[in-house]
Image (cartoon, grey):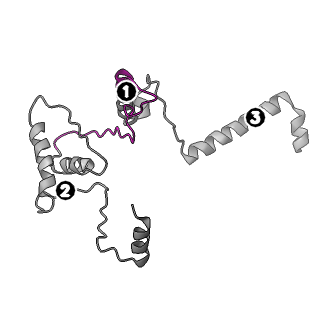
Amino acid sequence: MNWRFWKKICANNSMEDDKQVSLTPALLNRDSESDKKQYRSVLNLARKLEEKDILNIALTGPYGSGKSSILRSLMKDYRKYKYLSISLATLKSPLDDKKNKIDIDTMNNRIEYSILQQLIYKEKQETLYNSRLKRIYHKSTWAQYALSFAIIFYIVALIIVFEPSFWRWIGFAIA
């Protein structure tokens, strides 16, 4: 690749073909001419969902191929179905690594664990009391203040019970 050529073009800011496309998911419009070709995938999925024996659908493809756009459009236009999005994105396949070859069973176990983990994390923590998967629980600001006050009160109570001279040090007299 000729880097001087690209450096000169960028410095002169004379790139005519500056067509940058956002890869963020977008809703496909069934009536739009530009989205007709991509919307065909949404219609095919909807047709498959009508069959009684189809319970799950998986979309695969490279980054930026439109998987999320298809799913969002399907969710918007066909609200009668229940949807659960699970992402198994990886940037490098473990099968591509020649040095640390991972067997198929290990890879399947990792995929199953990732799916279960995402299913469990979508539920409230209170409903999964027997789960070993723990998540970080954030307390509200009020709860943090209440806990801090309770700890300080407990410490002061212990000091008063086991060290009565503490009252005299503070300046209170015990009758």
Residue at 32%, 38% in the rendered image: 86
Secondary structure mainly formed by the magenta segment: loop
Q: What residue is shown with label 3?
A: 155
Q: Nearer the viewer, mark 2 or mark 1?
A: 1
Secondary structure of the residue carrying numbered label 2: loop
Secondary structure of the residue carrying numbered label 1: helix
Q: Which is nearer the eye, 74 or 92?
A: 92
Q: Position of residue 79 (x, y in %)?
A: 18, 46
Residue at 29%, 67% in the rendered image: 19
Indicate left or right for 19 with 156 as reference: left
Q: Which residues are magenta?
A: 80-109
Q: Position of residue 133 (x, y in %)?
A: 46, 28
For the C terminus, which image quadrant? top right
Residue 107 tag number: 1
Residue 28 tag number: 2
- Which amino acid type is marked by label 1? Met
Of mark 3 and mark 2, the one earlier in the sequence is 2
Instruction: Classify 142 as above or below 37.
Output: above
Q: Position of residue 17 (x, y in %)?
A: 28, 70
